[in-house]
Amino acid sequence: MSEGHHKQSFWTKYIWSTDHKVIGIQYGITSLIWLLFGFALMAIMRYQLAFPGSPVPIVGNLLGEGGILPSEMYNSLGAMHGTIMIFLGVVPLAFGAFGNYLVPLQIGAIDMAFPKLNAASYWTYFLGSVIMVTGFFVPGGAANSGWTSYPPLANTATMGQTVWLFGMIMLITSSLLGSVNILVTVIQLRTDGMTWMKLPIFVWTQFITAFLLLLAFPPLEAAGVLQLMDRLVNTSFFMPSGLVVSGEVLQNAGGGSPLLWQHLFWFLAHPEVYVLILPAFGIVTEVIANNTRKPIKGYKSLVYAMIFLGFMSFVVWAHHMYLTGMGTTIGAFFQTTTMIISIPSVVILTALLLSLWGGSIRFNTPMLFALGFLPMFGIGGLTGLPLGLAAADIHLHDTYYVIGHFHYVVAPGTIFALFAGIYYWFPKITGKRTNETLGKLHFFSSFLCMNGVFMPMFVTGLAGVSRRLWDGGESYAHAAGVFQLNELMSISAWLLGIAQLFFIVNMIISLRSKKTGEANPWNATTIDWTDTTSPPLGHGNFEKVPTVYNGPYEYSVPGLKKDFLPQSEKG
Amino acid sequence: MDIPFNVKERPDTGLYNGKLGIWFFLASEVMLFGGLFSAYIFLRNGVDDWPAGTDYLDVPLATLNTLFLISSSVTMVMSWASLKLNDFKKYKLYTLITLLFAIGFLVIKYFEYSAKFAHNPPYLPSTNNFLGIYFTMTGLHVLHIIGGILVIGYFYGPGSKMWNSEPERFTNRIEIVGLYWHFVDLVWIFLFPVLYLL
Amino acid sequence: MTPEEVQHHIKTYVLVFVALAFLTVVTVGISYIDLGVKGGIALGLFVASIKASLVACYFMHLLDEKATIYWTLIATVISFLILIFLPAGAFLAQARIY
């Protein structure tokens, strides 16, 4: 690590690297590929939903008899779409890629606290993701019991479920290693003058996310071990007595509880959704501050709201379980905490919206995605409210309304924020510029198509169309009035896929363009921009490790000639 | 360029990086075993005929195991203290004794498990949920013991070379390993009464 | 810790070891007293907690530790208690038909 400047082999420099920037890029490329793959799975599903029983074009012969998607495979695609998008795509991109690359740069550190552990966490993720996907190649296909893997269905499912469990254990381990690294790095390696209240909001969000991952993931790992035991050595942790499967009584001891899995699963999976949104808040804050040339409104409110959000996220999980017969006392408890947790989200969204007021807004590509994020997250959050109220949830649980709700938060929500981040930090990471025209085309087409896919889901959900139905509700009378919306949603989804070509082409031509050499093209205040080259130095990031004097968003400081005051510049 | 505060403590937190790291890792381990304890409570409350530990388990053997682990904990902290007092020979001695106690724990566990499998009818994890959760919790604990033995063994052997080049960094590493080992002891302190005696 | 402080601590380590061994015997002994299920659990966990506190405070040096560690542990303990008590509470409060 601290060796002289000897020549590193290709393998040491780019593959087994312990440099946080290389590892961040490794996470980034891997996760983007998995996001594309998970999208493709959904694109196949949506053909079946729009035209049930018709042969699927292009990939039909891979699927089944006559090119039609069989229902078991539909279930696999659904379970794997969810698992891949969350655990192989969004979290590794938001936390592994953005977190690893930017946190040391933004706090003035030369690397993460444990570089070798960092490399281990990436390769564990890589291995876990490969294991996950091999599920498609085992007899019976990949896991098909939903990303939620509820017993008894998951316990008695085909081999793919066992592969899923092993994959999850590796992915959880990778996450834990990454969390420890971020937490120690932020606490111990802040440079001189970088006090807690001078940290960029991006770093705060990564820090809180790391805490959530650290404490919430292990119970799911425990549950995964228990489900593996049930499947492999015939224990009955989740299997009640007297179960009959396909006409045969199961030969096991019984006495277990399917609800136990649900509690342990959602204990993670609820904080997990805040893991999905917090990095997005962080990225959007950075981009908005920079492109309004104004300080963020309510820095302290943002910090305290996010800390409160992180804490509350541990006591709301059973709002995913309202219909399990919990009883009204417990239901009322979780309903109350769920209503309370909506408050910090509103505080955060309000602070970001108010930050736009009076700003000199630059409508570049990152800012468009950040601006698009705001109303999309607003819709996602608002549609969560009837779901959080137990009485309304009786009608809406497990319908398309839920799917619409969470996709609004993650897809035109988090993923838009991640695109904002990629366009924003592309010049720093590569030293080159992206094409603005392609970027704007990417944004507007994606924005339109996202709403085309997900807005109708509220309509079909309110009509009562259940989720995870292979025929999209065709065989149900209550779906008759809304069934034709499936075709609209599917076409929007395929157009959304095509719209991503604007992004892919932009990345390719931009990477092949000439370096501009500009260190700080956005005129940003944070030290990742002001004190590093573009790209940053391989060994140690900074020519001279900066000292911090100012807050993170000192834009348009009265009396200053230029409209921004870098954190490391004595004002 | 070296990562700061790897060996010397950072002034405002008073910690070096590895110590903070291992405490965070232990926090996640608390939640891992916590998940299993939560499962135990849930499963036990769900049935009226939960067996007593003594129906299946050997209390005297487990008591001996408990004493083995407690002893290994005190020898582990003594091996760190020896390094602080610059006594490398004592460090080696105490570390060796720690390893012997740990291996002794595994040996007794081997006898416990094989007695159950050899029983007629065999006592397996699938026999009932008490045995299921017993094997899972003690099994996971055993995996942690094995991990600890491997790491402590490494620092007894090839890893101890660092004492000659960077004694303070080596002492910190032993402190970190010790914290992990004490945690493994802590888990057993709760596992023992919960599974065997209650 | 300075070498002098360490010497002083060694005495404490030996005392703690003796206390732990003694409490182990106590744990086994009280399991023979019939206190009912709830009483047995409460007392057993109480003694285990004392032993655990001794290991944590003295062997793991928690008594001398820094604020950052304390805050981490407090957050962990709170999450742990939520994980232990809420699912069990939900289970006990519900109507059971199986």
Image (cartoon, coloured by chain):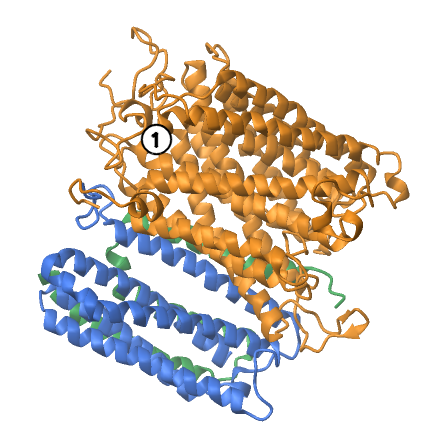
Q: Is residue A206 above or below residue A268?
A: above
Whole-percent x, y for residue A401 in the image: 73, 38
For image coordinates 53% across by 33% down, the residue present is A344
Between A419 and A295, the one nearer to me in the picture: A419
* Relative depth, front residue between A292 and A161: A161
Q: Position of residue A138 (x, y in %)?
A: 62, 61
Q: Residue furthest bottom?
A: B120
Residue depicted at x 65% and y 70% = A256
Q: Quadrant of the C terminus of chain A?
A: top left
Compared with B114, A571 (above or below) is above
Chain (blue): B
Q: Which residue is mark 1?
A: A199
Chain letter corresponding to the colour green? C
- Return the chain for callout 1: A
Q: Is residue B90 left or right of residue A334?
A: left
Within-10-Å neighbours for mark 1: few <14, some 14–19, many 20+: many
Give percent across and percent down for residue A85.
Answer: 58, 43
Circle 1: element type: loop
With A190 as the anchor, is A259 left or right in this view?
right
The colour chain A appears in is orange
Position of B10 with respect to A451 (left or right) is left
Left or right: where A443 falls relative to B162: right
Instruction: Identify the residue at image location x=42%, y=36%.
Output: A98
Q: Quadrant of residue B101?
A: bottom left
Q: Position of residue A145 (x, y in %)?
A: 68, 56
Q: Quadrant of residue C61?
A: bottom left
The one nearer the camera, B165 or A126, is A126
Q: Can residue A313 be seen in the rendering of this structure?
A: no
Report the front residue among A64 and A362: A64
